[in-house]
């Protein structure tokens, strides 16, 4: 019998003990990757999901309702609606506070009126919608 045999046996016992202890130690649940949360941070999806396309004709859609401002080619007219406001500012304000300025294309026989609801849009969603409408 070699002198290494007892040491080999001790090493095997220690290795087995470490393996058992490692298995018994609870590090908590194994972390799982976060589930992908569906986002609508693209213009066409937001335009549909937030209901814009219900009333407005947009870059990629046609509204079934008449009498609401057409939002196609917004880059050609949005900057001319309010003195001192860029197209981006005008569209963003119209989404945040629809009643601040009524589009001249939305004046009925009784004068200017707005049927547009105040939408629960985040600033990120407003930015995406403005960029979408301006063709960016």
Image (spheres, helix red, strand yellow):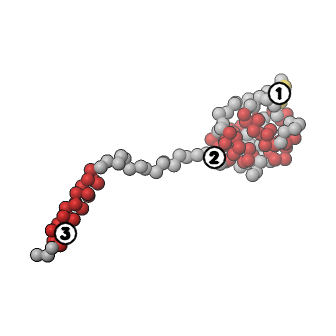
Mark 2 secondary-structure assignment: loop
Q: Give the quadrant of the N terminus.
A: bottom left
Q: Would you call the spot at circle 2 few (<14 residues within 10 Å), some (14-19), or many (20 or more)? A: some
Q: Would you call the spot at circle 3 few (<14 residues within 10 Å), some (14-19), or many (20 or more)? A: few
Residue 11 or 81: which is nearer the viewer? Answer: 11
Locate residue 134, reporting x and y percent. Answer: 77, 48
Locate residue 109, reporting x and y percent. Answer: 84, 26
Judge depth for marks 2 and 1 and give the one in front. 2
Q: Which residue is mark 3?
A: 8
Above-or-below relation of 31 to 69: below
Locate residue 83, reporting x and y percent. Answer: 88, 37
- Residue at the outermost front position: 3
Q: Would you call the spot at circle 1 few (<14 residues within 10 Å), some (14-19), or many (20 or more)? A: some
Can I make out residue 1 in this image? Answer: yes
Q: Residue at x 87, y 38 (%)?
A: 84
- Residue at the outermost left position: 1
Locate residue 33, reporting x and y percent. Answer: 46, 51
Give the label on residue 26, or none: none
Judge depth for marks 1 and 3 and give the one in front. 3
Res 128 → quadrant: top right
Left or right: 98, with 111 as reference point = left
Structural distance between the alpha carbons of marks 1 and 3 = 93 Å
Q: Which residue is mark 1?
A: 112
Quick check: marks 2 and 1 in contact, CB under 8 Å? no
Left or right: 33, with 38 as reference point = left
Res 117 → quadrant: top right
Q: Residue at x 65, y 33 (%)?
A: 120
Left or right: 128, with 79 as reference point = left
Q: Which residue is mark 2?
A: 41
């Amino acid at each position: 019998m070699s002198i290494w045999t007892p040491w080999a046996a001790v090493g095997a016992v220690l290795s087995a003990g470490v393996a058992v202890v490692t298995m018994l130690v609870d590090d908590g649940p194994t972390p799982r990757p976060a589930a992908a949360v569906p986002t609508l941070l693209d213009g066409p999806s937001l335009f549909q999901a937030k209901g814009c396309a219900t009333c407005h004709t947009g870059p990629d859609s046609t509204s079934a309702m008449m009498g609401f401002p057409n939002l196609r080619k917004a880059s050609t007219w949005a900057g001319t609606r309010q003195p001192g406001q860029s197209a981006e500012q005008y569209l963003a304000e119209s989404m945040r506070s629809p009643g601040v300025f009524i589009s001249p294309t939305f004046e009925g026989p009784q004068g200017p009126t707005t049927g547009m609801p105040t939408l629960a849009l985040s600033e990120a969603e407003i930015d995406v919608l403005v960029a979408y409408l301006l063709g960016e």
